[in-house]
Image (tube, rainbow, N blue to C red):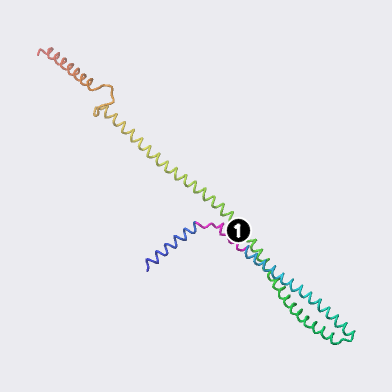
Amino acid sequence: MGLFNRMSTVIKAKMNKIADKMEDPRETLDYSYEKQLELLQNVKRGVAEVTTSKKRLELQKAKLQQSIDKLDQQAKDAIKADREDLARLALERKTALVAQVEGLDQQITDLDQEQQKLVAAEKRLSTKVEIFRTKKETIKAQYSSAEAQVKINESFSGISEEMADVGLAMERAEDKTEQMKARSAALDELIEQGTLEDLTGSRDEVERELSKLSSQSSVDAELAKLKKEAGK
């Protein structure tokens, strides 16, 4: 179980590292801003719907009020005409309509309160969204600037590494050159001392042999001369 837990932890750590490299804070900020705008639009839509409903109820109330006024006039006319029965009927209808108007008044009051709450919420949310938008753009600009600086520094770092490699290569070339010079000087010295034959000289093998013979003849002649002088 311990091994599996460690493997799981390592995998999660690597996945988080990969996700961190892939994540662009600017995209995340833009996405959050879009979500806030959607929420703000929903609140505004709610305000519009509540306002529309309230206006519809107010129009309905106005029509009922016209009917109430008409029934009230009809009741008065019926009384003048000694038609109490018609006046009673008109008043009964008027009473029913008045009850409806009172119900509409309560609904209109409730919708008005809801409208005020939504309008206040919309204003607060609009302010927050605008503040977020300003802050978002500032952070994005700072991130872009930092990203550009990192790329510049990485470029300089790459150049420095390349120059370091070039410097090492130059040092190796200089060392090899010095070694070759030292070897050449050593060979020259050995050739001058006779330890090594100068294969690059102008004399060939025949010339060297003839030179030896000439030298030997000269020695023999000198030796014979000395013997003669000595009477031997």
Would you identify the image quadrant in which residue 5 lies? bottom left
Q: Residue 73: x percent and y percent? A: 86, 80
Who's the residue at 42% across and 43% down the image? 165
* SS for callout 1: helix
Amino acid on which disc 1 is placed: Lys
The magenta region covers 22-36
Who's the residue at 56% across and 52% down the image? 144
Which residue is label 1 attached to? 136
Who's the residue at 60% across and 58% down the image? 136
Question: Magenta segment: does it hold 174?
Answer: no
CA neighbours of label 1 inside 10 A, class few (<14), some (14 to 19), many (20+): some
Vertically, is 168 above or below 38?
Answer: above
Residue sitting nearer the eye, 227 or 36? 36
Q: Residue 186: x percent and y percent? A: 29, 32
Residue sitting nearer the eye, 213 or 46? 46
* Relative to 74, 132 lies left or right: left
Would you identify the image quadrant in which residue 182 lies? top left
Vertically, is 165 above or below 118?
Answer: above
Q: Main secondary structure of the magenta part?
A: helix
Image quarter in which the N terminus is found: bottom left
Vertically, is 41 above or below 103?
Answer: above
Q: Residue 171: x percent and y percent? A: 39, 39
